[in-house]
Amino acid sequence: MTLYQIEAEHREIENALFEADGEITPELEIRMNITRENLEAKAIGYALVIKENNADLETIEAAIKDLKAKAQRIEKTVESLKGRILEGMQLFGVEKVQTALVKVWMGSSKRLSITDPDKVPDAFKTEVKETKIDARSLKSAIEGGLQTDGATITEHQNLQIR
């Protein structure tokens, strides 16, 4: 099998896995079956696909982070501009500004302000309880001799790709 054929086969498998939401179907299981003869070629091919997917994932996560930051900046810009328009309209006593492109007017709304949460009737309160476990500290404590029935440390084999 040529390098081109191996790469094409791995791309087909990658695409099929992606379309199946990462689930290995029986047909894929057969195609992905690794024998002693093709272990090295498949391991290298799969590792290259994994590295490429990890790089894509990093790119996507960075883009999401950038887009979230941009969305926050846009929200702040919109709020600042709306505040300036409202301030100007209030200052000059103008109720409405209208052109062929936009219509701007002052409206009123009612906003709730909680002045003393303890005095709000219980019927309007919801208790939220969240428990988080500090896994890093717990692992260190168990490795240091802590005995607990609630957690254990197990050793796993994992794949390293660079």
Image (cartoon, helix red, strand yellow):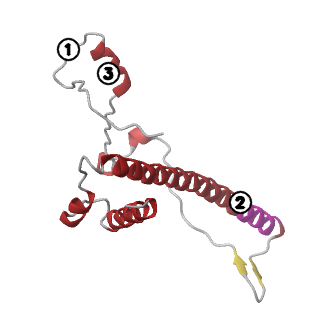
22 relative position to 69: left or right: left
Mark 1 Cα shell of 10 Å, populated few (<14), some (14-19), many (≥20): few
From the top left corner, tell me how far across and down residue 69 is, in percent: 62, 53
Quadrant of image for the N terminus: bottom left
Give SS at disc 3.
helix
Nearer the observer, 49 or 118: 49
Furthest-bottom residue in view? 100
Q: Quadrant of residue 156?
A: top left
7 relative position to 156: left or right: right
Residue 82 in view: yes
Work out whether mark 1 precedes mark 2 in sequence or the reverse, and give the earlier one.
2
Residue matched to label 1 = 147
Work out whether mark 3 precedes mark 1 in sequence or the reverse, and give the earlier one.
3
Nearer the observer, 152 or 81: 152
Mark 1: amino acid: Gln
Distance, label 2 to label 3, CA atoms, is: 44 Å
Mark 3: amino acid: Leu
Give SS at disc 2.
helix
Work out whether mark 2 precedes mark 3 in sequence or the reverse, and give the earlier one.
2
Furthest-right residue in view? 92
Nearer the observer, 45 or 99: 45
Mark 3 Cα shell of 10 Å, populated few (<14), some (14-19), many (≥20): some
Distance, label 1 to label 2, CA atoms, is: 54 Å
| Segment tinted magenta in the rendering | 80-91
Distance, label 3 to label 1, CA atoms, is: 11 Å
From the top left corner, tell me how far across and down residue 9 is, in percent: 37, 64
From the top left corner, tell me how far across and down residue 3 is, in percent: 44, 59
Predominant secondary structure in magenta?
helix
Residue at 21% across / 61% down in the picture?
Answer: 30
Residue matched to label 3 = 138
Mark 2: amino acid: Thr
Mark nearest the camera among 1 and 2 is 1
